[in-house]
Image (spheres, rainbow, N blue to C red):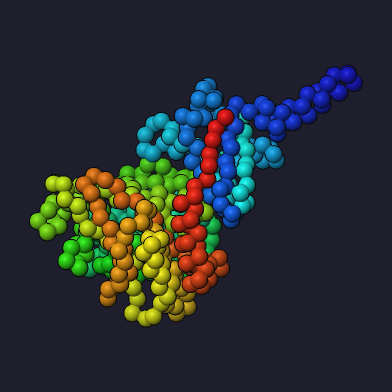
Amino acid sequence: MKKSLILLVFFAGLSGAVIGQGIGAKATITITNPMNVGRTDEVIAVNWSAVKAKYPNIDTANFKVIIASSKKEVPFQLERKGGSDVQNLLIQLSLKSKETTKLSIVAGKPVRSVAKTFGRFVPERYDDFAWENDKVAFRMYGKALETRKDNAFGTDVWVKRSTKLVINDWYKSGDYHADHGDGMDYYSVGFTLGAGDIAPYLKDSIIFSKNYHHWKVLDNGPLRTTFELGYDEWDVAGKAVKVTKTISLDAGSHMNRVEARYSYSGDQTLPVVIGIVKRKEAGTILMDEQQAISGYWEPKHGVDGITGVGVIVDGGNVKMSIDKTHLLAQTIARNNQAIVYYNGAAWDKANEITNAQQWFNYLDAFKRKLSQPLKVSVE
C-alpha cells in the first residue's frame, strides 16, 4: 500500500512537471511582443488551422490553454466569423516589453470564460444595435427611429466606470441618462457622425445614408464581439450606393475595429470622411495626418464629466480638416474594397484616462501596436 502511494504521488508530480514544461502539450503557442513597451490585456488571434495542424484531433469542447511557465489556465474564445467552422483561437494576455510567452494546449475541460464583450439588436428601443465591453459601450440607430423627431445617425457612446456588462440592465430600466454608479448615456449625436462614423463626402458636404436596416451577429464574446450592419441603397450625387459595416470590439480595449465596404456601379473612387462631432465649447484637439490619428477631449459636460473620442485610419493616407460640426479624416473608398479604421472613447470618471494628454497617448500607443503586431507561432 505504501509503495503504491509513493508511485501515485511520483506520477502525479511528473504529470504536472510535464505539462508545465510543455512536453505533454498537444500544441505550443509562442507569442512575442516586439515593442519596447508592455501590452496589457491584449486579445490575440491564433490561426485555428495552425492549431489543428499540430493537434489534428482537438475537441473544441475539451481542451485547455495553459501558460507553460506558471501552469495558469488562460480563458479563450473560438472565433467563427459568422460561419460554422472555427477561424481563430482568441486569447487575452499581458506581455512586458520584448517578452516572449509560451502557451500549451492540452486536453481537458476548460474553465468557463467570463463574458467581457456583448452586443445585440434592440427591437424594444426603435431597432438600436448596442454593444459593449468591460471599458465602454456604443450604439447605432436603426430603421424604426427614422420616423421619429428624436432620430439620430452617427455612432453613440455610453460611458462606463464598471467592468460589468450593462446593456441589458440599462435598456430594461430605461434610466440610463443618469449615472447610478456604473455609467450613463450623455453623449449627444443628432444628425452627425457622432463618435467616428463614416459617410460619403462630396463638395465639402457629408452625404448621410438612412439608418441601418439589416444586422447580423458574427461572434458574441466572451473576448470579442463582431457584427454586421447593412444600409439600404441611397443616392450620392446620382450614384446608387450601399454600405456594409463590420464592427468588432475586443475585451480590454477602448477602440472598435470598423470595416466599411461601399458598393456602387462604375470604377470611380468615392470620397468618404470619418468624423467626430465637435461641441460648441472649447475642447482639446489632436489632428495628426501623418499617423492618421484624430483625437478629441471634449469640454466638460457639467457633473457628467468629460468624454474623449478618437479615430485611427488603418493605412493612413488621409486628409484632415475641421468644419463647424466635425473633426474630419478624409480618405477614398473603392468599389467593394474595405476601408478599415478604429473608433472609440474613454470617460474621465472611470479614473483610468483622466485628461487629454493621457487620451492622446492612448491613441498613439494603439496606433504603434497596430504597426507592430504581436508575433504568434504554433509548434
Which quarter of the figure is the C terminus placed in? top right
Above-or-below relation of 291 to 22: below
The quarter of the picture where residue 299 lies is bottom left
Looking at the image, which residue sits at the far front?
290
- In the image, what residue occupies the spot 45% across and 57% down? 367
Q: Nearer the viewer, residue 155 or 100?
A: 100
Looking at the image, which residue sits at the far right?
2
In the image, residue 260 lies at what x, y percent?
Answer: 29, 50
In the image, residue 75 lies at what x, y percent?
Answer: 57, 41
Left or right relative to 321: residue 295: right
- In the image, what residue occupies the spot 70% across and 40% down? 70
Residue 180 seen by the camera: no
Above-or-below relation of 368 to 190: above
In the image, residue 369 lies at what x, y percent?
Answer: 49, 53
In the image, residue 376 lies at what x, y percent?
Answer: 53, 39
Above-or-below relation of 86 to 265: above
- In the image, what residue occupies the spot 25% across and 55% down? 332
Q: Nearer the viewer, residue 170 or 192?
A: 192
Residue 55 seen by the camera: yes
Q: Nearer the viewer, residue 166 or 323?
A: 323
Left or right relative to 181: residue 274: left
- In the image, what residue occupies the spot 48% across and 72% down? 356
Left or right relative to 230: residue 309: right
Which quarter of the figure is the N terminus placed in? top right
Q: How many marks?
A: 0
